[in-house]
Amino acid sequence: MKSIKPLISLKKKIRLLFYIVVFLTLAIGLVSICLSIDLQKRVDMMINHHINEIVYALELSKESQKLQVISAKLSKNDSEEQRTLLLSDLQRQWQTLARGLEKLTSMASHDERIKKLNRLSSDIKKATEQQPLLEQLTETAIAAQIQASHLHLNMELIQKGFARSVQKLLGILDQYANTLLGTQAFNELKRVLDEHRQLAQFLHQGEELFRLVAAVNKSSDNAELNLLQRESMRHFLALKQHSMDSIVAKEIQSDWISQIEPNLVGEANIFAFSREALNSKRIADTYLEIQASSAQDIARFSSERVEEANKQVNLAGAELKNDSNSFVILIFIAGVLYTFLIWLTNWHFISKGIIQPVIATSNAMQAIAHEKTDTPLPKTNNLELQQMVSSLETLKSYAAQVKAISEIDGLTGAFNRRYFDLRLVQAIQSAHNKPHPLSIILFDVDNFKQFNDRYGHVSGDQCLKQISASMKEMPELQDRIFARYGGEEFIVFLPYTGATLAKEIAELMREKIFHLQIPHEDSVHRQHITVSIGVCTTLPNNDTTTESIIIQADKALYEAKQAGKNCVRAADTGVIFTELS
Ligand SMILES: Nc1nc2c(ncn2[C@@H]2O[C@H](COP(=O)(O)OP(=O)(O)OP(=O)(O)O)[C@@H](O)[C@H]2O)c(=O)[nH]1
């Protein structure tokens, strides 16, 4: 069994549709907002975390490179003032690095990385702790360097005085030897020459010693310094021995030895100071090297972090790009779905569900207004439209009733005169375009007044009904207009029918009514109801009117009455077509 679909109110449907569209719009909007917030968050996180980490790591790398430069300058620089300044720079730089590292540590989430950062922090701590020691070593080195420099200066002054003094003595010996050459005092000359040779050797030894001592200042490692000290001491002892063995200017030589000796021998000698300066500097340099290496570690770690963070940014960027692409695709699909839904709504609901039924209802209303009362009414599952259709159904039945009332005679069920006249006018007009004959059969019940008088009006009405029913049954009158023309008068319109055939049909009608055997005691014709019939056949022209045809038929009827009733008479119009249409 086919289930009956319940009718749903149009208002309800529109409200439901509105809710669905609003819900979908809100849902799509909400999803879009959530997705864009998520994307925004991830972009912010990437910027706040990775980008900041890159910035901090780059800063740290730059600062650690600065520290390396400072420590390199420190190990090269001998100026006391410069070194002190550089040491305070170094201290400040370590503090800057410690702060930078702290920032990176606060951002680190990876265990391994936190461990590494802690290790680097402890390096920084150590470096900071080493600072006083480094300062002390630097101070010691500088102090020893200053002492060694003083002794160098001293030795340079001694060297100049020594050379001048010995060369002066050599000059005196030269002059004396020249004088002796003229006197032929060869023995004395030989002695003077020996003395000159000894003094020249003394000068040579001394100059060699000063050369070695001068080299101490430039020496940069202990082995070289030891060698220089050994060589210097060898030359100094030789010089000392020379002065002791010498027979010439012995006192002067001893005086020079006594000036030179304190610089080379004893606790505060030039080698000891140089060695102390060298050792302190070497230790300080070692510390500086360690610190530079720590700074290098930090720089390396920072660079690695920059690289890693860069990779992470690239990955996150690619991921974000993918997500934003998916987001765009999602919005696009939602848009397509949304458009499809709107189209579906338009097509299914508005066009098919509302507009089409409304148009169909309007067409049906127009058709009904034009008296097409058999027009089928549209089907709809909308409550309001269905109500309209139901109302239209009622109107349709009213229209049908009105039409029937306006066309059908209420008593006999035959067409009424108004309808007959209308059809006759139409037929005359169509005959103008395509000429063809048409006939009219007009009949009147004989002695009907007497019938009414004898049997009463109700029986009279019954009689008229009976006559009408019998006429409608006649095959010859099927598809023809049979109408009650007024009172007890009936009329038949036969298009495409000539006079002969019309007369024959009229005769058949007369016989049919006669054979109804409706009793009529007062009738002169065998005491039954009879009719008199007038026939008129015409070939319509421009002058033909309904009245002119009816008048002719009426005349013929009158003739039939005059001829004794219960007979057929035809008007003589000259048209004798016999064919049946
Ligand atoms: N019962 C009934 N009588 C009607 C109706 N219409 C007209 N009549 C009667 O029909 C009668 C017609 O009478 P008349 O015109 O004198 O004609 P007649 O008596 O038939 O005489 P002839 O036509 O000469 O044979 C009148 O008495 C009317 O009252 C109707 O609808 N019902």
Image (spheres, rainbow, N blue to C red):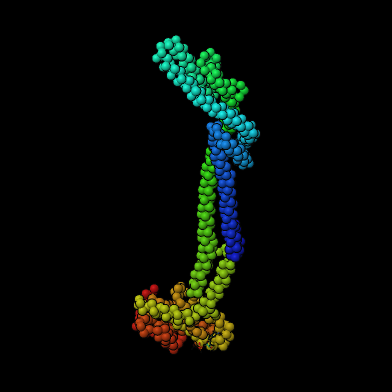
Q: Which residue is drawn at 40% across and 11% down?
A: 184
- Position of residue 523 measured from the top left corner of the image (x, y, whole percent): 52, 86
Toward which corner of the image does residue 291 lie, by quadrant?
top right
Q: Is residue 357 above or below residue 558?
A: above
Of residues 112 and 463, which is closer to you in this image?
A: 112
- Position of residue 224 measured from the top left corner of the image (x, y, whole percent): 53, 21
Of residues 265 and 325, which is closer to you in this image?
A: 265
Q: Is residue 326 visible?
A: no
On the rendered image, what quadrant is the C terminus found in? bottom left
Q: Residue at x 62, y 33 (%)?
A: 135
- The answer to whether 409 appears left or right of 182 in the picture is right
Of residues 27 and 340, which is closer to you in this image?
A: 27
- Position of residue 253 measured from the top left corner of the image (x, y, whole percent): 53, 19
The total of numbered circles placed on residues is 0
Q: Can residue 557 be seen in this view?
A: yes
Name of the residue lying farthest toward the top: 187
- Position of residue 304 measured from the top left corner of the image (x, y, whole percent): 55, 36
Q: Is residue 61 above or below residue 522?
A: above
On the rendered image, what quadrant is the N terminus found in? bottom right
Q: Is residue 466 above or below residue 92?
A: below
Q: Residue at x 55, y 71 (%)?
A: 392
Q: In this view, does 57 lie above or below 331?
A: above
Of residues 446 and 537, which is closer to you in this image?
A: 537
Q: Residue at x 51, y 72 (%)?
A: 365
